[in-house]
Image: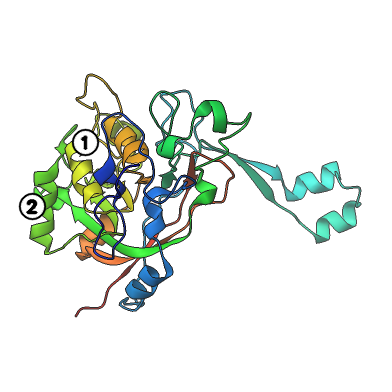
C-alpha cells in the first residue's frame, strides 16, 4: 500500500505528489475513483467561492461552433459539421409524418443535426482520453474497461458540475505581448512570475487557466493551430503539485507543440491525465478576462453527460470576485 500524499490546504490529497514517470497513478481517492482531482469539487468549495462573487458581470469563456472552425483533425477525427434535418418548405413538400399540408404550414418546423469530434471547441478531456500502453488513470485498462463503443469508466459523464475558485495566469501579459511566440514553452518560471505580477496565489482545488494569447487570432486556423505555445511538463507539474483540479488554456492542445520530448508527442497530456488525475480544458477564450484584468473568479461549468466519452464540450463562465 502506498502512503497517502501530503494534503492540500483543506486536507485533500494531491494526486500529483504520488506520480511516477510514465506510470498511471493509483488514485488516492480510492480504487473505484474515475474523476481524480475533480473530487475536490465539493459543495463546501462551491459555497465558499460563490459567497464572494460579483454577480453583476459574467464572462463567457466558450468559443462558438461553426463549419470551418479550427479543430484537431490531424489524427483523422472529423471536423465540426451541421446540417438541417427539417425545414419549413421541406415539411410541406415531403410530409414525412403524414400530417398534410395545412398542419405543416401551421407548424413551420426547423431542425438540425451535428457531427463533431468530442474534443472540438471549448471542451474538457476526461481521464480516459490518454494513458500509457492501454492503461489510464487509476489502473483502468483497455482490455478490461473498454466496450465496443466507448470506455465503461472515467468518461466525461462521470464529471460533476464544477463550481470552484478559478485563476487565470496571464503569461502573454507577463511578456507584454498579445500572443506568445510559436512553440514557446511555459514552465515554472513563467507561471511563478505571472502569478507574482498579478498578485495571485494558487490553492488546492483551483481551476487554473493559462493564457497564451492564442485566442487573439481565433478563428484563423493557419494562425491558431500550428506550432502553438503552451505548457511544458515542468510547468504542468508546478500546477498539478499546487493542487489544481482542472487545468486549461486558450490554445488547441494545452501544451506546446512540437513537444520537445523525443519520447512523446504529448507528454503534458499523459502526465496530467494518467499520472496527476487532472482533467484538461482546451480552447478557453480568455481574452475578455485579460482585457478586464480579472485573474480570480468563480468558475462554473459542466460537461455534457455523454456516457463513456473521452471528452465533452463545456460552456464555462467566470464570475469575478468582489474586491476585499
Q: SS for tag 2? A: helix
- What separation in Å lies between label 1 and label 2 (alpha carbons)? 17 Å
Q: SS for tag 1? A: helix
Q: Which residue is mark 1?
A: 233
Q: Residue at the location (32% across, 76% down)? A: 53
Viewer-proximal residue among 216 and 300: 300
Query: Is 310 rendered above or below residue 109?
Result: above
Q: Residue at the location (27% across, 42% down)? A: 18
Question: In x, y percent, where is residue 57?
Answer: 34, 73
Query: Is 99 rendered above or below residue 260?
Result: below
Q: Residue at the location (45% across, 36% down)? A: 68
Question: In x, y percent, where is residue 300?
Answer: 40, 63
Number of marks present in the image shown:
2
Q: Of tags 1 and 2, which is closer to the observer?
A: 1
User: Dots 1 and 2: beta carbons under 8 Å?
Assistant: no
Instruction: Please report whichever mark, 1 or 2, sits nearer to the chain's N-terminal start.
Output: 2
Report the quarter where the N terminus lies: top left
Question: In x, y percent, where is residue 10?
Answer: 28, 66
Q: Residue at the location (38% across, 40% down)? A: 26
Question: In x, y percent, where is residue 118?
Answer: 50, 39
User: Is residue 98 something that shows in the picture?
Assistant: yes
Q: Give the quadrant of residue 13.
A: bottom left
Q: Residues within 10 Å of mark 1 (few under 14, many from 20)?
A: many
Viewer-proximal residue among 8 and 248: 8
The colour style of the image is: rainbow
Q: Residues within 10 Å of mark 2 (few under 14, many from 20)?
A: some
Report the quarter where the C terminus lies: bottom left
Q: Which mark is residue 193?
A: 2
Q: Is residue 90 left or right of residue 248?
A: right
Amino acid at each position: 500500500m502506498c502512503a497517502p500524499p501530503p494534503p492540500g490546504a483543506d486536507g485533500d490529497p494531491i494526486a500529483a505528489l504520488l506520480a511516477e514517470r510514465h506510470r498511471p497513478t493509483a488514485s488516492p481517492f480510492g480504487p473505484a475513483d474515475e474523476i481524480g482531482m475533480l473530487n475536490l469539487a465539493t459543495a463546501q468549495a462551491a459555497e465558499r467561492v460563490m459567497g464572494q462573487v460579483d454577480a453583476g458581470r459574467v464572462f463567457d469563456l466558450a468559443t462558438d461552433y461553426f463549419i470551418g472552425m479550427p479543430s484537431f483533425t490531424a489524427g483523422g477525427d472529423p471536423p465540426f459539421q451541421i446540417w438541417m434535418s427539417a425545414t419549413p418548405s421541406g415539411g410541406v413538400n415531403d410530409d414525412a409524418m403524414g400530417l398534410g399540408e395545412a398542419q405543416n404550414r401551421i407548424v413551420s418546423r426547423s431542425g438540425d443535426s451535428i457531427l463533431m469530434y468530442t474534443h472540438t471547441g471549448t471542451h474538457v478531456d476526461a481521464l480516459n482520453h490518454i494513458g500509457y500502453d492501454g492503461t489510464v488513470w487509476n489502473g483502468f485498462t483497455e482490455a478490461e474497461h473498454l466496450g465496443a463503443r466507448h470506455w465503461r469508466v472515467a468518461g466525461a459523464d462521470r464529471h460533476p458540475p464544477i463550481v470552484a475558485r478559478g485563476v487565470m495566469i496571464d503569461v502573454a501579459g507577463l511578456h507584454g505581448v498579445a500572443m506568445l511566440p510559436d512553440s514557446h514553452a511555459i514552465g515554472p518560471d513563467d507561471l511563478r512570475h505571472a502569478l507574482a505580477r498579478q498578485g495571485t496565489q494558487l490553492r488546492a482545488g483551483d481551476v487554473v487557466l493559462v493564457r497564451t494569447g492564442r485566442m487573439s487570432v481565433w478563428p484563423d486556423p493557419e494562425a491558431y493551430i500550428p506550432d502553438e505555445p503552451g505548457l511544458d511538463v515542468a510547468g504542468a507539474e508546478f500546477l498539478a503539485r499546487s493542487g489544481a483540479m482542472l487545468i486549461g488554456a486558450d490554445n488547441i492542445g494545452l501544451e506546446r507543440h512540437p513537444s520537445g520530448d523525443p519520447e512523446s508527442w504529448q507528454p503534458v497530456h499523459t502526465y496530467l491525465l494518467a499520472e496527476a488525475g487532472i482533467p484538461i480544458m482546451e480552447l478557453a477564450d480568455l481574452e475578455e478576462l485579460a482585457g478586464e484584468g480579472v485573474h480570480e473568479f468563480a468558475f462554473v461549468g459542466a460537461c455534457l453527460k455523454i456516457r463513456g466519452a473521452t471528452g465533452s464540450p463545456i460552456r464555462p463562465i467566470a464570475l469575478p470576485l468582489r474586491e476585499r
